[in-house]
Image (spheres, rainbow, N blue to C red):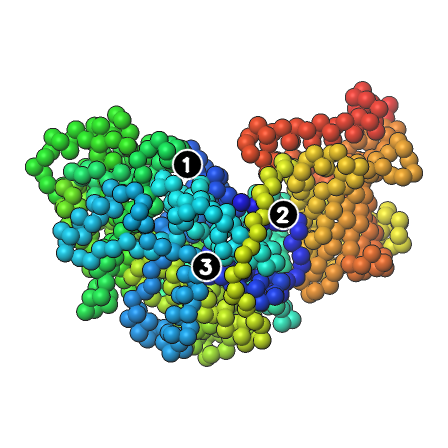
Amino acid sequence: MSRLSRPITEIRDRYDVVVVGSGYGASIAASRLARAGRQVCVLERGKEFRPGEYPDTGPEAVAETQVDLPGHHIGSATGLLDFHVNPDLNVLVGCGLGGTSLINANVSLKAEPRVFDDPRWPQEIRDDLTAGIEAGYERALEMLKATPYPQTFPVLKKLEAQRISAEYMGKPFYRPPINVCFEDGVNHVGVEQQACKLCGDCVSGCNYSAKNTLIMNYLPDAVNHGAEIFTKTAVGRVEQVDGEWLVYFDLHNTGREHFKAPPMFVRAEIVVIGAGALGSTEVLLRSKKAGLAVSDRLGTGFSGNGDVLGFGYNNDVEINGIGLGSIPPEKADPVGPCITGIIDVREQPDLEDGYVIEEGSIPGALRHFLPAAFGIFSGLVGKDTDPGDWWTEKKRALESLVGGAGKGAVDNTQTYLVMAHDGSAGRLELDANDKVRVAWPGIGAQPVFRTVNDALKKATEALGGTYIPNPTWTPVLGQDLVTVHPLGGCIMAADAGGGATNHKGQVFSGSRGEGVYEGLYVMDGSVIPRSVGVNPLLTISAVAERNVALLAKERGWEIDYSLPPVPVVPDVPLPVGVQFTESMKGYFSPADAGEYQAGFDRGQADGSTFEFVLTVVADDVDRLLDTPEHEAAMVGTVKAPKLSPSPLTVTEGRFNLFVDTGTDPAAKKMLYNMVMSTKEGRRYRFSGFKMVRDDPGFDLWSDTTTLYITVYDGAAEDSAVLGTGILKIVPDDFARQMTTMHANGNRGVVEGFGAIAKFGKAFAGDLLEVYGGADKLFRNSS
């Protein structure tokens, strides 16, 4: 499939709508508002994965893991598996284009109707269950294409074991609808998909185009209708200025942080925050800290959706519940999609007593770690449900240690995923580093979790195994829990005294009353005011479908929901490029065109500083070097107090490497052209050049680190000259710049180093051409 995201250098300075995040709510907003004819920009903090790029080995899984600890972050900020470690409740979310849909277990089930009877839902929601929520469910199902595991597909041992457990417990069992494709073909939005290979690796990312993640439906649909998606853009906060919204973001993997560069911003009439329960709450909490008036209830009503993780280890029946990882599917027995069966214990007299038990599969990328890990945990916290076969169980455990996860005890291990109700009394707060943390003392001691663990022990008893609860759910470790379904934090309510958003997802504009920001919405799991007791993705989607329809209707925009056939966009392999980040500092001041030294001197005397941090991106190193323009793109920020007291954002940047001057055949120029936008809405054009010429003395350093600049009063080509000046690279910043150079679009380390080497060789060659040989590069004035 073709890439959905664009290079960040193509971002504009303004859109009708900016969507923050790319999970279910965000993707629905992007798709529907693009269908309504709006110019939509999507900002996603993670990177874009295509099938075939997800981790399927242990080292790859480690490389794609990030851990957010109090006061410390481990791993890449764009790692797919994003763990948030907290004192009471730990959270795992997905980081990438498509959000947690990339690593979830695919289940699309409606919430029990009684969930919506809860008065924590605004009355407008409870009065709109048929026309709003139910219609939202149907629209979401039309896009997600959920279907149960087919009866015609191979028998799955873990599914059969789940059925045995259900019968033993006397509880209802069925195959739930899952967002998985079971036939080859082009789907309803023009994406070519394959039938599920039954590899069991759903929760580490599907490498076979079979999982109906958001990059298979809503997101390509948004792109089909003109939305522009940018990845590795981490939104920090939002701000309202003159009736419009500024969305501030940092660029990942550019090295801008080495220069302490300020964030960039993009302007919009409407902002839809859909960064998930943790992300959206974090963005709004930061915005509140920066001065945005919001409800004091922001951060409250957090829920882990009653999630419980457990294992039936070393059962007397084979489970085959470990994903294949790098093992070709045709060379192994079918594992199946992660979840294919459910023991549904909802519909209890008291809603809060209901729960569901789903079987799962563990990603194959982890299979080498599992024999030892399960052996240790079974000894520490495991409860053997049939102690009469001790020797047989030990033999199976030894088989796993010797033969791997596909043998013995681990091969006979069932994974349980439970959703229940937890009271939704958690709180999200910012720590000293402006990172969101979960505060919920005593959550693990709630009776519901004891009830669920007793049920899982019984499910394991049916299979003759050892029940292992979540290893952190022990008195020694404070009965900490793990959730993969965080909800709340920006909960909807009747007014600001009850929640952070109204029934439409609009953010309350103060601590009291019903006043809202007309153009600021939240659409994701953070607005859900309580646990839903089942996989929440479909309920999140239904609420988002309802609310984006209301957003459009109130503005007279019509959403076209039709799904005519869409041609497949051919997959074009990405070329290998290079990028680096550069910082330059100096002075500028009003002066006539070409009077650079005069502008610099006057600016220095007046304290009129000018500095930038620019990331230069060449998406195709061959095109950069082989075309006479030698052109790359630029994006970044400028600090120029005479233009604005706040940093300016750079768009439409163009960089030309060693082009002819047109007048001096012995010289070359490096050209910088860009548009700078201020927070206040002013736009300026910037033009600069470095003159590389072999003059007497050692002038190589000076030539390649001195930029002569002109600033124009407006973005148009014919704008009047506002001022001139000179910028320079200081040695410390040059050293930092060297650390930021890396390849992009490469498909391996060797290819990446090759691109950098090619660029470096060409750069050095151009210098040799100008300065007449290596011996003259280092001549001095003597």
Task: Give the residue displayed 62% in from the left and 72% down from the top.
Answer: 243
Instruction: Give neighbour class at mark 1: few <14, some 14-19, many 20+ (Cα, 10 Å).
Output: many
Q: Disc 3 designates what residue?
A: 143
Question: What is the secondary structure assignment of the residue under circle 2?
Answer: loop
Q: Disc 2 designates what residue?
A: 7
Question: What is the secondary structure assignment of the residue under circle 3?
Answer: helix
Q: Disc 1 designates what residue?
A: 56
Where residue 174 sits, quadrant-wise, is bottom left
Do we see residue 722 in this rendering? no
Q: CA distance from mark 2 to mark 3?
A: 27 Å
First in sequence, mark 3 or 1: give its number.
1
Tell me where residue 287 appears, x and y as whole percent.
Answer: 53, 63
Where residue 290 sits, quadrant-wise, is bottom right
Tell me where residue 475 appears, x and y as whole percent.
Answer: 21, 49
Q: Amino acid at mark 2?
A: Pro
Q: Which is more toward the observer, 222 or 428?
A: 222
Indicate whether 727 appears above or below 492.
above
Tell me where residue 641 appears, x and y as whole percent.
Answer: 72, 58
Relative side of 739 to 288, left or right: right
Indicate whether 393 appears above or below 266.
above
**Marks 2 and 1 close (CB-CB < 8 Å):** no
First in sequence, mark 2 or 1: give its number.
2
Q: Nearer the viewer, mark 2 or mark 3?
A: 3
